[in-house]
Amino acid sequence: MEVFPKENPDRRFLPDLPSKNGTRRQHDTRYISEGRADVYSVDGKYRYCSGKVVNVSEGGMLLDADRSLHVGDTVVLRFFLSAGTMPEGFESFVKLPARVVRVDGSTRQVALRFEKSITEYFKRKRWRYFEASSLLGILLALVGVWFIKKESIFYFWFDVPVFLYGLCALFYLLSRFLFAALYRPYPVDSGFKPTVSVVIPCFNEEVWIEKTIRGCLNQNYPEELLEVIVVDDGSSDGSVAVLETVRRKVFEEVGERLFVHVFPENRGKRHAMAEGARRAKGEVVVFVDSDSFLQPDSILQIVQPLKNPKIGAATGRCEVENKWTNTLTRMQAVRYFIGFRIFKAAESIFDAVTCLSGPLAAYRKDVLLRYLDAWVNQRYLGQPATFGDDRSLTNYILGSHYAVYQHTAITHTIVPSTYRQFYTQQMRWKRSWLRESLRAGLFMWYKEPFMAISFYLGVILPLLAPVVVLRAFVFVPAAYGVWPTMYVAGVFFMSMLMCTSYLLIKRSNLWLYGVPFCFFYLFVLLWQIVWAVLTFWKSEWGTRASKHDKSLSLG
């Protein structure tokens, strides 16, 4: 079962539309809770009662109390926000003064308003310690990296390949952090609001598709300038029935702004995306994956970079929705944040983001249509390209325009929560990375010099990594009896640099999962690169049980 914050349903299906003055829920969203709270006197010496928390928000809670309270009572609440109850960073013990504002005599449910918001409470306490600890951690990590590389230079001639690789990797990674620190998102120009068509390709997503559609429609963006197009790619589950239900449910509110097209049989994700793009009426086409959920201002934020006519496309920030499910999803949460806030932000400094991510990416329609047919009909060794859609389309855009990252445009996506699904996804991503990186290498050399150098290092280093790791952990110990202590220490300190950066920005307990993920990558995921190189010609999707993939695997 996936674990993530569950919002208390609003009476209005689309509460954030401008026509409904919809900004209330953004400021004080109520989350369903399964926790308990104790109610104490103001001096904290006497416990009045306790009860189950029905829902909780930044400003208050609804408590199913085991004893009666009265309107106007001033109390102190003590409760624990468990992981997944509220957004990341709120998981902690809370002690807040509150006032009773409403009592339901029949159910004993008590509505309490906090004297200050939970955010204000954490800013004065928990988050201040997190910020101080993270800055200290970053400093210690940098000192550790400096010491390791100083030793590497001293022993350079002992093992030139390993230590040369280490120095290049250090330069590459530290440059990512430096450039990311210089990154700034594009500001919102309230006068720039182009017409937008959101395209959602859907295949076997009956569980998540309604939430995805709701997020795309529930935007604080002029309704007459926004449409949503869902293209079902021949789903074999109940996705089509869900789409029909949603269409009927929202018709009175959105009318023809929601359009649904169903393929009679599976044709592949690219064909679904292309169908939506061709039907789009907007100046901007925004692609959203069918298991990704936009925040109410995501569309307004994602279109802002396109005010510059040289920018052909922009991608937003993708957070992990189900991060609290298990250890694997927690590790992915850290990885996603570093991948977007550090690596994509660093690339965006040079207007050359190498992968516009599927969960949220905006394209100028005229630029997109220019490359659409070539992209849809792309082939490898005679087989249709059925994955790597995002990287492939990004390469077409980068050939003539800029591609950038907009940190303030946020979407949340469902990530694999089992290792089998995760391995399959990573193998598919590595094959597409290899294919499209080789293709991008043909034109990246004429981009900004720092970007070009970073790009080629970003390709060469991962390809050489298995050889270097094998030499450091097998050959050198066997031949010379020297264990790769410095190599492991270097990986540890670099992982700590990533983790403490995560802690500084996110102020979350999840930062600890970055270290095990780095070693998980080193000893497990790294070796997928070897298999990806040996099988780069394969075109199966791997996680999509479609007729299209079956025909490819048999052919």
Image: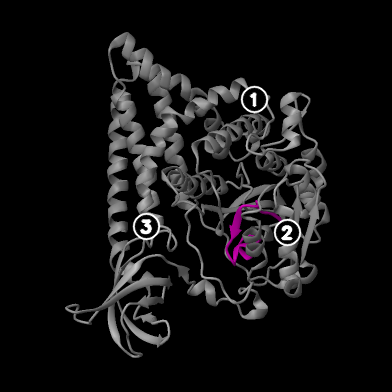
Image point (51%, 53%), residue name = 319
Distance Cα–Cα, label 2 vs label 1: 36 Å
Q: Label 1: how many residues lie within 10 Å, few (<14), some (14-19) or many (20+)?
A: some
Q: Between residues 303 and 330, which one lies in front from this camera angle? A: 330
In front of the other: 18 or 348: 18
Q: Residue at x 36, y 64 (%)?
A: 81
Residue 506: percent from the left, percent from the top?
41, 56
Q: What residue did someone put label 2 on?
A: 243
Could you tell me which residue is drawn at 71 percent across and 64 percent down?
246
Of the numbered discs 1 and 3, the one sitting upstream in the chain is: 3
Q: Which kind of residue does numbered mark 2 sit on?
A: Leu
Residue 396, image x and y in percent?
72, 41
What secondary structure is marked by label 3?
loop
Mark 1–mark 3 contact, CB under 8 Å?
A: no
Q: CA distance from mark 1 to mark 3?
A: 39 Å
| Residue reaching furthest to the left | 45
Residue at (47, 42) in percent of width and height:
176
Question: What residue would you read off at disc 1?
Answer: 536
Residue kind at label 1, given as amino acid type? Phe
Q: Position of residue 515 (x, y in %)?
A: 36, 40
Q: Which mark is residue 122?
A: none
Q: From the viewer's perspective, is 507 left or right of 325?
A: left
Question: Which mark, residue 507?
Answer: 3
Q: Nearer the viewer, mark 2 or mark 1?
A: 2
Q: Is residue 11 left or right of residue 92?
A: right
- How dense is the environment of label 3, judged by Cα within 10 Å: few (below 14), some, or many (20 and up)? many
Among the 4 quarters of the image, the one containing residue 196? bottom right
Which range is magenta? 285-303
| Residue 300 on the magenta segment | yes
Element class at badge 1: loop
